[in-house]
Amino acid sequence: MQNKQPVIAPSILAADYSRLGAQIEECNKADIQWIHCDIMDGHFVPNISYGASVVRAAAKSTDAFIDVHLMIENPDAFIGTFAEAGAGQITVHQEACIHLHRTIQSIRRHGLAAGVAVNPATSLHTVEPIINDVDLVLLMSVNPGFGGQSFIRSTYQRLQRLCTMREEHKADFFIEVDGGVNLDNIEKISRSGADVFVAGSAVFKAPDIPARINELLREAKAGKEMVI
């Protein structure tokens, strides 16, 4: 899995919701593989984004894999709701789950891929007990709760450490980065070990969305090619 092709996952948190279908269609023109949905509840993070109805609308607008990131308290109560809305994968926060194994098992029982996210100040060792049980580990490269934040540079070292952990445990999961990803840093993020790149403002604020996605993908591929 370490050598697979990079994936750009546009985050609809940065989209114009009055034109959501049209903006996702622009992503489709770039043959996008994933669409990222950030769910915020105003409790786990200091903001509210949207709910299952928007995820359902997004899923109806694309054939892309729907990557749902739950930045919420008590995520177990909402796994079924987002599964029904069209999620292909649900990622929960290590910090929000009292019984993380049980939550991952619940996601799998709904027939979905399962991911775990960690905040910038959370030790990567907290996910070691489930590292062979997940399909994805998401490293937050900003403190979650708002779009448009700047990338936290210590994430580069955390990516490298997570890659080492994946090798040491002979694990098989995607490494995803969310927060502040743009044309200026995506090549280095890729070189540091990321596989999936969540991009919100970098995609949806661009004058030409398909062209921007292709630019980001080119830079991410260049980073992979530089890894020895």
Image (cartoon, rainbow, N blue to C red):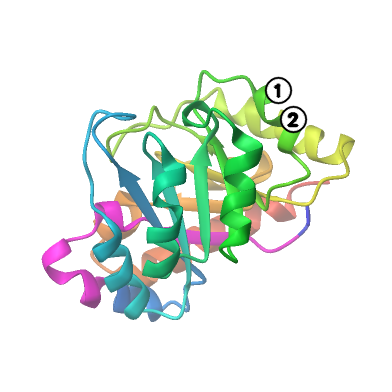
Q: Bounds of the magenta span?
A: 4-23
Image height of 85 relative to 228, above or below: below
Residues tagged 1 and 2 counted as in contact (Cβ below 8 A): yes
**Residue pointed to by mark 2:** 128
Quadrant for the N terminus, please. Answer: bottom right
Residue 23 is left or right of residue 198, and the answer is: left
Cα–Cα span, label 1 and label 2: 5 Å
The residue at the point 84 percent across, 46 percent down is 228
Give the SS element for disc 2: helix
In the image, 69 versus 161, the foreground residue is: 69
Is residue 43 or residue 142 the one in the foreground?
A: 43
Is residue 182 something that shows in the picture?
no
Measured as percent of width and height from the top left, residue 27 is found at 36, 73
- What residue type is disc 2 on? Glu
Q: Using residue 111 as the reference point, say whether residue 181 is left or right of it.
A: left
Would residue 7 be counted in the magenta stretch? yes
User: Is-magenta flag for residue 59?
Assistant: no
Quick check: 84 left or right of 14? right
